Image: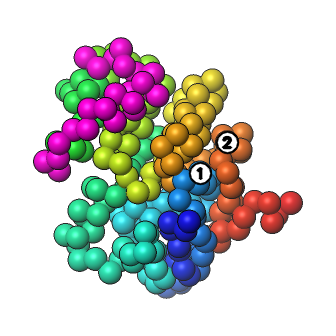
Amino acid sequence: MELLKVNELTKTYVKKNKTVYAVDHVSFQVDKGSFIAITGESGSGKSTLLHMLAGLEIPTSGEIILDKTNIYSFTEDQLTIFRRRQIGMVYQFYNLIPTLNVKENILLPILLDHKEVDQNYFNQIISTLHIEDEMESYPNNLSGGQQQRVAVARALIHHPTLLLCDEPTGNLDSNRAHEIADLLKLISIKYDTTIIMITHDMNIAMQADDIYLMEQGKLSKFEDRL
């Protein structure tokens, strides 16, 4: 079932009186529960694309239809609520709050939204990510791989419609990077979570169901380039 549809999405900048296309008329579709990787060189536009999917950056033109709703038809306040409730974000550098312990970091999105914690779901997530013994630990006492697992748990805790991962393995060694990629694949299958991951590492991208290549703002399916 189609969850996400991107139509002619474009982002331009003016540089030295010339129009530069960071994202150039990109169109693609993603089914619910799919795990998609987008790879490409630095500056190819992949992070700009991800930020527009997250509602963090306004496109110049085009549309993003998520769960049958054009997210850029929202007011600014509606878009803020949409991001908080519908989008999960995982970044390269974890972005954990050092003064909060692991449990508090994970539950923060729920508490900020004044929602009740689904304890059963919380227990499932921390078990799946193998961090159930770290609830009272603080981020500075964890390895990079453990911190990223906590960041993934935090992104999942509010049952996001779409999980967006911006170079989630970029700050990890090879072994830890493959562990995180394996866990994202498991999460996609176990929780029917729709994931779009940006990565420069083709070995990590190979974990995904489909791979797209971003070049100079244009997106193409990797298998079409073979």
Q: Is residue 212 visible?
A: yes
Q: What residue is shown with label 1?
A: 35
Residue 152: x percent and y percent? Answer: 42, 37
Q: Are marks 1 and 2 in contact (CB under 8 Å)?
A: yes
Residue at horizontal 32%, vertical 23%? 139
Residue 114 lies in the magenta stretch: yes
Residue at horizontal 54%, vertical 45%? 188
Q: CA distance from mark 1 to mark 2?
A: 8 Å
Q: How many marks?
A: 2
Labelled disc at residue 8:
none
Q: Is residue 98 visible?
A: no
Residue at horizontal 35%, vertical 63%? 56
Amino acid residing under circle 2 = Gln
| On-image quarter of the N terminus | bottom right
Residue at horizontal 24%, vertical 44%? 109
Q: Which residues are magenta?
A: 113-136
The part of the image, by quadrant, that contains residue 60 is bottom left
Residue 158: x percent and y percent? Answer: 31, 47
